[in-house]
């Protein structure tokens, strides 16, 4: 279902999550430690939710970074620009992260998606 949502709508959703529920924001598209985060020009994973573009960074980039560096650039939704990307890989990754939220968090997210 998320794959049918426009990139503009996903950007608005991501902004709403960042403002209204920052703890949830940190659980969606979160990449590992020391990751350089997201990059609209990277084809090795820099536009893929939850992957990012390699090591050497600081912090834990998540949904707000994915929004700012990939989605607002008009790339990566619903499919990343990763070489040999699976169709709708970003939509599937976001949906997968949403399923891992608590019931209370899912209620909040549902309200923001509406």
Image (cartoon, helix red, strand yellow):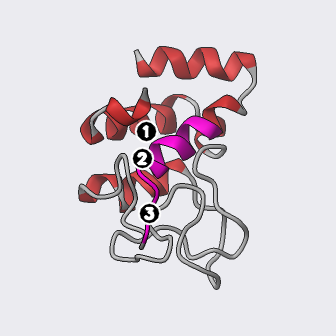
* Mark 1 neighbour class, 10 Å CA radius: few under 14, some 14 to 19, many 20 or more: many
Which residue lies at the image location 62% right of the left edge and 38% below the top edge? 96
Q: Quadrant of the N terminus?
A: top left
- Label 1 vs label 2: CA separation? 17 Å
Query: Which disc is residue 88 wearing?
Result: 2
Q: Quadrant of residue 83?
A: bottom left
Provide the secondary structure element on which disc 1 rests. Answer: helix
Q: Which residue is mark 1?
A: 14
- Label 3 vs label 2: CA separation? 8 Å
Mark nearer the viewer, 1 or 3: 3
From the viewer's perspective, tell me whether residue 35 is left or right of residue 76: right
- Label 1 vs label 3: CA separation? 22 Å
From the viewer's perspective, tell me whether residue 65 is left or right of residue 4: right
If you read the primary sequence from the N terminus, does the residue marked by circle 1 or circle 3 appear first? Answer: 1
If you read the primary sequence from the N terminus, does the residue marked by circle 1 or circle 2 appear first? Answer: 1
* Mark 2 neighbour class, 10 Å CA radius: few under 14, some 14 to 19, many 20 or more: some
Q: Quadrant of the C terminus?
A: top left
> What's drawn in magenta, residue-wise?
84-96
Provide the secondary structure element on which disc 2 rests. Answer: loop
Q: Which residue is mark 3?
A: 85
Which residue lies at the image location 58% right of the left edge and 18% below the top edge? 108
Question: Residue 49: x, y in percent?
Answer: 52, 55
Which residue lies at the image location 61% right of the left edge and 79% below the top edge? 57
Q: Quadrant of residue 24?
A: top right
């Amino acid at each position: 279902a998320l794959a049918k949502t426009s990139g503009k709508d996903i950007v608005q959703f991501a902004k709403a999550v960042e403002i209204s529920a920052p703890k949830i924001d940190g659980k969606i598209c979160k990449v590992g430690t020391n990751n350089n985060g997201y990059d609209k020009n990277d084809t090795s994973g820099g536009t893929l939710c939850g992957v990012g573009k390699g090591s050497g960074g600081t912090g834990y980039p998540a949904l707000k970074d994915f929004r700012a560096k990939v989605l607002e650039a008009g790339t990566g939704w619903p499919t990343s620009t990763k070489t040999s990307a699976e169709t709708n890989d970003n939509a599937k990754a976001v949906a997968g992260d949403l399923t891992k939220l608590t019931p209370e968090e899912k209620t909040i997210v549902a309200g923001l998606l509406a």
